[in-house]
Image (cartoon, rainbow, N blue to C red):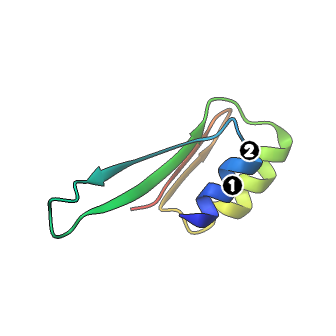
Amino acid sequence: MWQIFRFLCTHPQVRAAGYVVNTDREDYRTSIESIYAERVDAGLSTDATAFCTEADAVVLDGHLECFWD
């Protein structure tokens, strides 16, 4: 989470998506599964290529999508 947070701070145009399991459940948690951006410039492309190396799916074709399963 901390690495994703730092990436988002460096690239404010990037958004994160995930889910929250309520604290009433024994398995409560907050999970971030993906990051995305509508537009990709050269700086974001370079940083995202390095950041998303362990992602399960990566799209860097005019927009950014990195998904971790």
The residue lying furthest to the top in this view is 38
Residue 26 lies, in percent from the top left, at: 16, 70
Above or below 46: residue 51: below
Say whether residue 27 is left or right of residue 6.
Answer: left
The x and y percentages for residue 61 are 65, 38
Q: Which mark is residue 25?
A: none
Give x and y (percent) for residue 21: 24, 55
User: Which amino acid, mark 2?
Assistant: His
In this rendering, is residue 53 above or below 45? below
* Drawn side of residue 67 relative to residue 5, left or right: left
Taking the view exactly as shown, the residue that stands out farthest to the right is 42
Q: Residue at x 56, y 69 (%)?
A: 54
* Snapshot quadrant of residue 53: bottom right
C-alpha distance separating marks 2 and 1: 6 Å
Compared to residue 45, the image places residue 30 above or below, namely below
Determine which residue is flagged by label 2. Answer: 11
Q: Badge 2: how crowded within 10 Å, few (<14), some, or many (20+)?
A: some
Residue at image point 80% right, 36% down: 41
Q: Residues within 10 Å of mark 1 (few under 14, many from 20)?
A: some
Name the residue located 22 percent from the left edge and 54 percent from the top edge: 22
Amino acid, disc 1: Phe
Q: Residue furthest front?
A: 24
* Residue of label 1: 7
For the residue labelled by badge 2, is the local secondary structure a helix, a strand or a loop?
Answer: loop
Element class at badge 1 = helix
Asked whether disc 2 touches disc 1, contact meaning CB atoms under 8 Å apart, the reply is yes
Residue ID at (71%, 39%)? 12
